[in-house]
Amino acid sequence: AIHAMFAQVFAQTLALAAAGYLPPDARIAASRPCSALPRAGAIFASETREAGGQGPGAFLQRGLPKNQQPVREVQNLRREFLFDWPMDDGYTDKLKGLYGATMLVVSLPIAFDTYRVLPAQLPELLAAAHTGTAAFMVVAVLRLRLGWGFVQKRLKERVSYYEQNQRGFLAKKDDEAVLRDRLIEKSEVAPALRRIDRSLLPLLASLLVSTAALEISDVPVLRTLSGDSATRYTSQLRGDDEFAAAEQAKARQRMGGGAGEQENVKPLYCDSRYYKILAGGNSQGGVGCN
């Protein structure tokens, strides 16, 4: 009896479909075999995939140009040089490699031009090289921080700013776009910013320490003075014999060599007739040149 009842209901359904009481889509679906029906996944993929396979179009906010979408800005940022480094745990190792390459290729040769007396000036050589390298690294990491901070701000905003036809507009995000952008910000952008912040603080601290160490070091460094500083330095050389002797000893230490070579140290202007006359003294041959 139960089987007969189900058969009767099925027969009535077919009769209603034939009589036109069902919607057109339902009639078409009922008349097709299951194998002829398209799969929902294939329809979704064909309707939402963007050109070039860059991602689903459902991730785009309505009303905004594609190149100004917050999601697209995150994708473009990843393609920039260095900006994809904070995306995984290998960020620290990559920074160490950049630090080592900059130290060996750029900073050490430049620092060696100032601190040539080795091994006596080796600590100052390393401190100066680290100062230059750390300054470069701070600038690079700050650039990463600004880039990722910008996309984080764009993802958190409920109203997106965009430009079109040389005018600025505001587009309010719908609830789906707000939830999606928050998910991207928490899962991808926020971890990258945490890695950047953890690397920035040690770099700033080491830069301050190495700079302070060089300032308090007794190793002589050739500095260029101008204006009031040069005037005060010259006056102190003329009026303070102890200061003049200390500066002379520092100059000889910079020249290096043995004691005999240091006794023959002469001012640099001795090689120029013009500057010897300008210096005066010793019958216009320059003080200390004879």
Image (cartoon, helix red, strand yellow):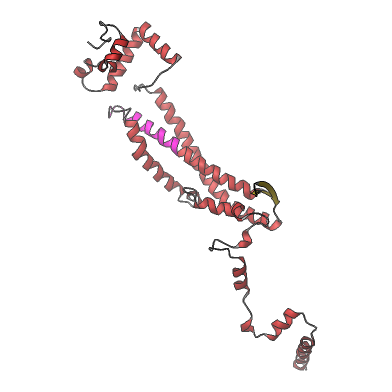
| The furthest residue to the left | 260
Q: Is residue 212 left or right of residue 32?
A: left
Q: Quadrant of residue 48?
A: bottom right
- Indicate the position of residue 184 as horizontal and vertical percent values: 60, 54
Q: Is residue 133 magenta?
A: yes
* Residue beneath the point at 55% across and 46% down: 148
Q: Is residue 39 left or right of residue 92?
A: right
* Residue beneath the point at 30% across and 8% down: 280
Q: Is residue 228 magenta?
A: no
Q: Is residue 78 visible?
A: yes
Q: Quadrant where the C terminus lies?
A: top left
Q: Nearer the viewer, residue 286 or 41?
A: 286
In this rendering, the answer to whether 93 lies above or below 268 is below
Q: Nearer the viewer, residue 151 or 100?
A: 151
- Indicate the position of residue 84 as horizontal and vertical percent values: 49, 51
- Indicate the position of residue 6 as horizontal and vertical percent values: 76, 90
Q: Quadrant of residue 7?
A: bottom right
Question: Total label count?
Answer: 0
In this rendering, the answer to whether 2 lies above or below 159 is below
Q: Is residue 268 left or right of residue 185?
A: left
- The region drawn magenta spans 117-136
Q: Quadrant where the N terminus lies?
A: bottom right
Q: Nearer the viewer, residue 213 or 271?
A: 271
Q: Main secondary structure of the magenta part?
A: helix
Q: Is residue 187 visible?
A: no
